[in-house]
Amino acid sequence: MSALLQDPVDLEKERLGSPPPAQNDQLAGAVVLMPDGSLASSSPGYSGIAEHSTPAHAFLEHSTSILFPVLFGTNVYFSFDRLYELKLLWLAALAIPLAFVLGDFVGGLVHWAADTYFSEDTPVVGPALVKPFRQHHIFPRDICTHTLVSIVGNVCILAVPVLALCLFLLWVSQHGLLAFAILGTSLMAAATVATNVFHKWAHQERPSAGVRWLQRLRLVLEPRHHQLHHTEPFERHYCITNGWLNPLLNKIRFFRKLEAILRFLGIETNASKRLAKNSCDNPRM
């Protein structure tokens, strides 16, 4: 079983309205208060745990969620304008699919790293990245109760400085290839920000007709495809934007080879660390 399910998840947060364990069978139809204040069925996959961001983190999530579309739109507009002036607009047709593929890869790489390395106590990335991923594997439908800002906020915090730098580079340079690179980067950032929205849709019990249409076309993450990540041995299908790269990365064992390279450099996975610790704690008699 993967590291994420063996790692204890810190669930010492306020549980609102959830019944005691002994009463779960009797209260299977009960409802619990979810983080956004709505009521959700206590169906399997829901924790009933209210998540609370610190005031500083909540401010960053909300402010960058507002800034992101502004910077994204500005970068896309000026990139297109620059490519049009230089008669290189055809490059935009290449940037769009390339951005979706790279967004899928970046999202998968981050997902794999959060599942395989670090801990919930790791500074910065632990509470913001590692813990949500690992808690998600225990309560996968909790993501369906989260607000838009709580879903995209952490990625926006990272994406906004990147887009600000891109806008500065567009301002100081007239180079066509730079405009192409910035257009691709901006679109990739948008795909990465949207990843958890697509991820949420893949876990919804009753997605809208439009969402189901996008899923059938495989433009966004498809539920049955993503379910393979939540199936033992829980170490494949890490890409969750649209999942296009999962078959290829699985076939070439990309993440296992990456783990081997990092192991050679002295960086062990959480699973390896636990095995070593258990060997020390329980030596053979």
Image (tube, rainbow, N blue to C red):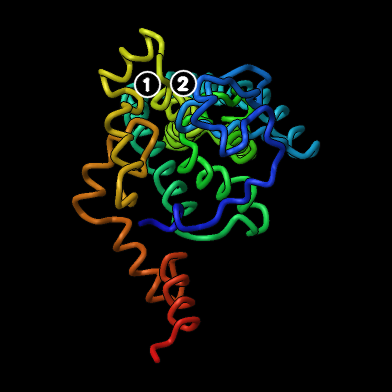
Q: Which mark is residue 141?
A: none
Q: Residue at x 37, y 76 (%)?
A: 264
- Mark 1: few/some/many CA within 10 Å (<14, 14-19, 20+): some
Judge whether 35 appears above or below 132 on screen: above
Amino acid identity at mark 1: Leu
Q: Residue at x 61, y 33 (%)?
A: 156
Left/right placement of residue 124 relative to residue 205 reads: right
Q: Which residue is mark 1?
A: 89
Left/right placement of residue 212 relative to residue 17 reads: left
Measured from the top left, where is residue 133 in percent x and y? 51, 44
Badge 2 marks a residue whose secondary structure is helix
Q: Nearer the viewer, residue 11 or 248?
A: 11
Q: Most extreme residue toward the left, as rendered? A: 251
- Mark 2: few/some/many CA within 10 Å (<14, 14-19, 20+): many
Q: Residue at x 41, y 27 (%)?
A: 203
Measured from the top left, where is residue 91 in percent x and y? 34, 27
Q: Which residue is mark 2?
A: 80
Left/right placement of residue 215 relative to residue 42 reads: left
Left/right placement of residue 12 relative to residue 145 reads: right
Which image quadrant: the N terminus? bottom left
Which image quadrant: the C terminus? bottom left
Q: Residue at x 53, y 20 (%)?
A: 41
Alpha carbons under labels 1 and 2: distance apart: 7 Å
Mark before the other along the chain sequence, 1 or 2: 2
Name which quarter of the figure residue 221 lies in.
Answer: top left
Res 181 visible: yes
Q: Nearer the viewer, residue 48 or 223?
A: 48
Res 168 visible: no
Would you say the residues marked 1 and 2 are in contact, meaning their CB atoms lie under 8 Å apart?
yes
Amino acid identity at mark 2: Phe
Judge whether 99 appears above or below 132 on screen: above
Q: Nearer the viewer, residue 131 or 197?
A: 131
